[in-house]
Image (cartoon, coloured by chain):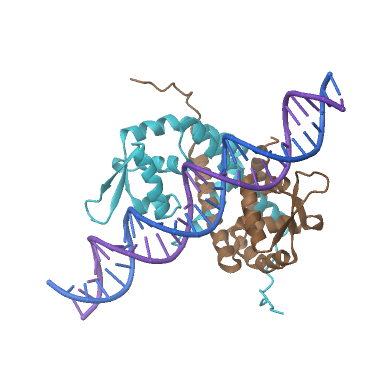
Chain colours: A cyan, B brown, C blue, D purple
Amino acid sequence: MAQTPDSPAPRWLDEQEMAAWHGFLEATSRVARHVEQQLKDEAGLSHAQYEILVRLSGAPDGEIRMTELAEGLFTTKSGLTYQVGQLEKRGLVTRRSCPTDVRGVLAVLTAEGRAALRDAAPGHVTAVREALIDVLDAEELAVLAKGLGRVGARLRPSG
Amino acid sequence: MAQTPDSPAPRWLDEQEMAAWHGFLEATSRVARHVEQQLKDEAGLSHAQYEILVRLSGAPDGEIRMTELAEGLFTTKSGLTYQVGQLEKRGLVTRRSCPTDVRGVLAVLTAEGRAALRDAAPGHVTAVREALIDVLDAEELAVLAKGLGRVGARLRPSG
DNA sequence: ACCCGCAGGTTCGAATTTGAACAACTTCGT
DNA sequence: ACGAAGTTGTTCAAATTCGAACCTGCGGGT
């Protein structure tokens, strides 16, 4: 009989830890669906696309390098290429090549893109409040910001 | 000029709320990737597949109705059909029709499935600790469990 | 100036997810 | 009982995601 080599038994999750992990999974899943749904229905955008518009709108000249944008959105370069392509088809974003690096590409927010974002934002914020923010009290929000901030930071490529 | 009808301006997110939302998004994204990666690399399972095995292993006779399973995993019925199909190909799960309802289908954990889960579990738990649990202190875990529990519950189909 | 290692984006195919449409069946009200 | 209405699980096509392979071009060391 083939035996699988023993993995050292890890410290299992106790009840509280299990509750936290399960809560995280369920909240994650349902909040994502809720937000995705709202944006799709009311603005015709995916959450990914919405976030791209947000980043661009906050950047100088409304433009950002592809790689930098991908990192900021916690996504892959190829995934971003696809979504920017979609947004470009709709005229919400343009591409131009980077002046300082021939290889580079800048995603640029168009006037239409800015308008689409303006239109989509109120409903999106409302959905985020309904799903997450307004369900938590101030103390809980503080813990989320700090604790999950730390969690995210630790998993960044940079460490 | 076509005018977009005004949406009532929502209450925008203040700094703390924004930090919580951003933290949630980043943590969500990175933790999911971390866990997904570990399972894929060390056990050849997707997180979705792993969770299916977990649920089944905790059920009487290791079997659950498809719909019930889908709800428990916060996923769609068609998504589950696909994943159970994958697991069935590998012999980790079987299907049998429900005795009390001809339409119904039970997903059943096989001995191989139970073994695969046993093998995968230690590494998975370790990954979850690394990514989330061990990064938070007791109080933070309590807030996650309670606060995010409430968040998830409120978005359940049942309300 | 030249070469090698590496970074920037895109492309490709494979895997997955989603919702709508469907067929078969159960259930509830009357 | 009977029929309308709702369930159950699957199938399908379309959209998305991922990583590996790829080509091009930047930069440091010699």
Q: Residue at x 37, y 45 (%)?
A: A84
Q: Residue at x 75, y 45 (%)?
A: B104
**Nearer-the-camera pick, A40 or D14:** D14
Check the image and report above or below for A6 versus B35.
below
Check the image and report above or below for D28 versus B132.
below
Check the image and report above or below for A3 versus A97.
below
**Nearer-the-camera pick, B3 or B15:** B3
Image coordinates of residue A103 in percent, x first then y, are 26, 56
Check the image and report above or below for A148 versus B126.
above
Q: Residue at x 40, y 31 (%)?
A: A118
Q: The N terminus of chain A lies in which quarter of the figure? A: bottom right
Image coordinates of residue D5 in percent, x first then y, are 72, 26
**Nearer-the-camera pick, A32 or B65:** B65
Image coordinates of residue B64 in percent, x first then y, are 76, 51
Q: Quadrant of residue B100?
A: top right
Q: Is residue B93 visible?
A: yes
Q: Quadrant of residue C26?
A: top right
Q: Residue at x 83, y 48 (%)?
A: B99
Q: Is residue B136 visible?
A: no
Figure disc tally: 0
Image coordinates of residue C5 in percent, x first then y, are 32, 73
**Nearer-the-camera pick, B40 or A57:** B40
